[in-house]
Image (spheres, helix red, strand yellow):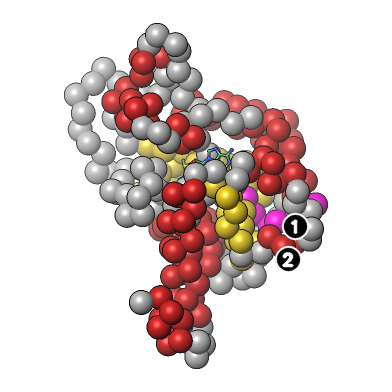
């Protein structure tokens, strides 16, 4: 298998297994939103998790989509990330509970790293004994010499973006506006962006819409199907914006 076999592909499967089949140095940027690692104890229902909002977690425990919160083995994944994306650069959406392990990995690998913040200015004003759930984090890690360019405003670490209702049937969709800025500064035109926890395909759709290549891997068929439709539309839009004549023909196929 070489890079071409994975370019602009959305793959159904366990991403660790798929990553093992990918060639060395075939990816330019890893951009992903992994499961939240909410640890559950046997008798505690949502109470045994490490997340802030019990109701939020309970929603996932009660659903048949536990893959959104299940553990992922960061050590094994980073072995693959640093092999397929070499020199390594990656963005990882995460909760505050995942920060220690991710930062530890960044330090141990000698990466340049930063913690970016998605500030949800419209977070529900819940009466609780804890701080408002109005922030998520994005850990950026990269090796010296990897692509990182942009104006000062593109490099601001705070993303002031409202939390949003899902548009594509996935409960943890991330805002396209955030992903656009990450791709703009870290992946030049034609670069390949890998998301091994694709969900509804936000990263791949944004990459396609910006003329970047993508590889997306998702374990749930329902989410992968949603991602395929979304990415297909983004690709057509990108061709249209690039002034290509194929636009009209593709529209006919779609509708
Ligand atoms: C937090 S969600 C990603 C949501 C995505 N950012 C979006 O905007 O739609 C994580 C996704 O990873 C998937 N997932 C969990 N374990 C996986 C695995 N081993 N291989 C592939 N996908 C996995 C889950 O099914 C879930 O859809």
Neighbour tally class for label 2: few under 14, some 14-19, many 20 plus, Cα within 10 Å: few
Task: Give the answer, above or below, for where 167 lies relative to 20.
Answer: below
Q: Which mark is residue 26?
A: 1
Q: Which residues are magenta?
A: 24-32
Decide: few, some or many residues near mark 1? Use Cα within 10 Å; few <14, some 14-19, many ≥20.
many
Residue nearest the viewer, comparing 107 with 53: 53
Residue 3 colored in magenta in the image: no
Q: Residue at x 50, y 72 (%)?
A: 235
| Residue 91 appears in the rendering | no
Q: Is residue 81 left or right of residue 201?
A: right
Residue 127, by quadrant, is: top left
Q: Give residue 31's position: percent from left, percent from top.
A: 57, 50
187 sits left or right of 96 in the view: right
Numbered badge on residue 249? none
Tell which of 153 and 248 is nearer to you.
248
What is the x, y in percent for residue 161? Answer: 34, 50
Is residue 176 something one can see in this rendering? yes
Q: Residue at x 48, y 64 (%)?
A: 231
Query: Is tag 1's residue or tag 2's residue first in the polypeptide sequence?
Result: 2
Q: What residue lies at 50% left-to-right and 87% top-to-bottom?
A: 246
Quarter holding the C terminus is bottom left
Task: Work out whether 117 lies above or below 3.
Answer: above
Which SS class for mark 2?
helix
Going by the image, does 50 lie left or right of 75?
A: left
Task: Classify 60 as above or below 254.
Answer: above
Tag 1, which secondary structure? loop
Q: Position of residue 229 (x, y in %)?
A: 44, 64
């Amino acid at each position: 298998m070489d890079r071409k076999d994975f370019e602009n592909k959305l793959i159904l499967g366990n991403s660790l297994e798929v990553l093992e089949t990918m060639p060395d140095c075939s990816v330019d940027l890893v951009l992903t939103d992994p499961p939240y690692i909410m640890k559950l104890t046997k008798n505690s229902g949502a109470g045994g998790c490490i997340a802030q909002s019990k109701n939020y977690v309970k929603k996932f425990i009660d659903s048949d989509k536990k893959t959104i919160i299940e553990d992922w083995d960061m050590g094994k994944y980073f072995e693959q990330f640093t092999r397929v994306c070499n020199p390594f650069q990656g963005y990882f959406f995460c909760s505050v509970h995942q920060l220690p392990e991710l930062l530890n990995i960044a330090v141990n690998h000698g990466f340049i790293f930063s913690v970016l913040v998605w500030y949800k200015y419209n977070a529900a004003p819940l009466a609780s004994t804890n701080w408002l759930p109005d922030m998520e984090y994005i850990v950026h890690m990269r090796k010296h010499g990897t692509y990182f360019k942009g104006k000062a405003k593109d490099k601001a670490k705070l993303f002031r973006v409202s939390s949003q209702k899902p548009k594509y049937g996935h409960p943890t969709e991330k805002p396209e506006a955030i992903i656009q800025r990450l791709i703009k500064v870290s992946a030049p035109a034609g670069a390949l962006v890998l998301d091994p926890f694709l969900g509804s395909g936000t990263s791949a759709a944004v990459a396609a819409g910006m003329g970047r290549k993508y590889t997306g891997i998702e374990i749930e068929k329902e989410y992968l199907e949603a991602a395929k439709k979304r990415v297909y539309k983004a690709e057509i839009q990108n061709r249209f914006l690039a002034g290509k004549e194929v636009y009209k023909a593709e529209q006919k196929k779609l509708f």
